[in-house]
Image (spheres, rainbow, N blue to C red):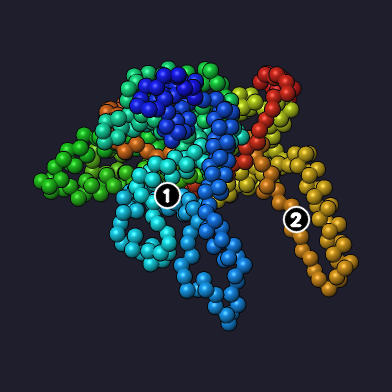
Amino acid sequence: MQAPSEKKTGNRYVAKCKYCLLEQEGKLERLHQHVLRCNSWPVSEKTSYLQKATEKTTLAHKRNKSSQEELIETTSELAEPSVRQKSILNWCTKSISSVQSEKLYSKLLNAIIYGNLSFNFVENLYIQDFLQELAPSYQLPSIDMLRGRILTRSFSNYVQKKLTTMSTFTDATICLDGWTDISENSIYRFMVLKEHEEHVIDIVDLSANRHRASFIKNKFQEIFVSNGFQISSAIACVTDNPSVMELMKNLLKSEHPNIIPIRCCLYAFNLIVKNIVGFASIVSTCNNNQNFRYHYATNDILIKIIKPVVDAIGRLESRDTTLADVFKELIYIHLEISKLEEDSISGFKAHALTVISRRAREFSNDIYFIALFLSPVYKSMAISKHMNGDRLLRGCLELARVWMFDKRDASLLFKELINYKDNNPPFDRISPNIQQSPRSFWTRNRLSPDTLSKLVQIKNELQQIVSKKKQKDKQKTISIPEPSEENVSLFFKETDDELEGPDELNEQIEIVNVEEEASIMEEFFDFEMFQKDQKEFSLIEEVHDPATNIVREEWSIEDILQNQ
């Protein structure tokens, strides 16, 4: 911050931020809040400032402890009363030090935030009475103190932790979600997703800006970079799919090929429900339920059609949802609706199947077929008219290249995928289990030389420990578990996405062309190769363990293909 020589606001100077050039009143609290929110500050400068500010606050609290507080703390440590003897401290109330009060204030704020409570909670007379009985010397903070100094300090600690954490993130999914609040403001939430973690990077109001794709892309990059996240560490970008977001993701991918554009699957499945209900006969039935004598029968047909889709939406809302689950659920609802008998509403079943096929077309990106191919139970189904085996293997190599695999790892990956596709050893002796996760399948059936070396060395060390202990005590039996191959990280990476569907769907109901869309599912998936006697499709739990890959040399896909 820079301070001009002339005073502009009463008796205070006006300070100017040297990064964003914003001028404001020179109050320390206000300046500190500006530093926390300013995206123009370099990450290293902001991290250094927050560390110094935290240290200064801690030292100030230590200096502010009164001699009386120190005496009470010392007395409480030395005067430990015995079981039979009572101390004078048993007959008086121990005061709470300022340092302890600050800790309690922070814990109270965390409870209010986590419980979605109002700051007015501290003015609740019953809460005040309860705390007075519990700890008479404790004074609740005021509302202004809670939402001012205490909230600022808590957020400052969070920002410091966030800047440190984001700089170490690799192979993460970046996410953008937008909505309109009750005041008609356009609010956007920026997130980073990794395995079972989700981090909200920022929430901003972009109402004052025109939401062009280039603007959103630039704002997207600005917010992530200013919060310490490296764009080169991202492997995918997830949003809903209006035209502006689709263009934004394409612009982002053109600058950063490592970022694969992914659309929100819940958005698409919600649209399936909306399009199915948009059938002309169903619309008239829903509008005239009170006067239509056959509305119970018609509603029963509608429920039978909609239920598989609603069940699929519920499963896709899981934190463990993967790209493969999108196609698994499309297959599930297609087969479930196909099993239904022809109903009294002419053309309704065909309309529902056509809607599903139409939405499946939106997921025609190769990465969805690759994810399905890597799920052992669905492997044969992924190889179809639309996507043959060679194209799947080439798509895997393309992902390995943009995700910066080195040539050696890419070659090993390609050889392993060929054996997997052709059921060559060791994959020929393994029968896939629908309850088994693909990660368990791959980690159990792949051990690199490096991993084998580590396991052998660790096992040898464990055997020596067991031998020594047996010599010391022959009567004891020591059992050391064998090193588990489940800890071996995945050679091929995927990503976890946890997204929520929009509250309102603004897309207009469109009339679908049955003849044009009916064969999409048969083109995408080979249903004949799938196990027809399978009664139910269970979602497969995907757990990821990505590792950082460093490019050691340039390579092309043709190099890998020619060397096989």
> What is the quadrant of the C terminus in the image?
top right
The residue pinned by badge 2 equals 482
User: Measured from the top left, where is residue 176 in percent x and y?
Assistant: 43, 31
Q: Which residue is at 54% across, 30% downward?
A: 46
- The secondary structure type at the circle numbered 1 is helix
Q: Which residue lies furthest to the right in this view?
A: 471
Q: Report if residue 279 is visible in the image.
A: yes
Total number of numbered discs in the rendering: 2
Is 136 above or below relative to 512? Answer: below
Task: Give residue 109's mark.
Answer: 1
User: Measured from the top left, where is residue 230 in percent x and y?
Assistant: 57, 27
Which comes sooner in the sequence, label 1 or label 2?
A: 1
Crowdedness near tag 2: few (<14), some (14–19) or many (≥20) residues, C-alpha within 10 Å:
few
In the picture, measured across the screen, residue 481 lies left or right of residue 393, that is: right
Nearest the viewer among 187 and 503 is: 187
Task: Give residue 427's mark.
Answer: none
Separation of disc 1 and disc 2 at Cα? 47 Å
- The secondary structure type at the circle numbered 2 is loop
In the picture, measured across the screen, residue 169 lies left or right of residue 470, that is: left
User: Measured from the top left, where is residue 393 in percent x and y?
Assistant: 62, 28
Q: Quadrant of residue 330?
A: top left
Nearest the viewer among 176 and 301 is: 176
Q: Which residue is at 26% across, 46% downward?
A: 301
Nearest the viewer among 268 and 88 is: 88
Q: Quadrant of residue 59?
A: top right
Q: Residue furthest left?
A: 291
For badge 1, the amino acid type reads Leu
The reply to whether discs 1 and 2 touch (Cβ–Cβ < 8 Å) is no
Q: Which residue is at 69% across, 34% downward?
A: 416
In the picture, measured across the screen, residue 40 lies left or right of residue 421, that is: left
Crowdedness near tag 1: few (<14), some (14–19) or many (≥20) residues, C-alpha within 10 Å:
many
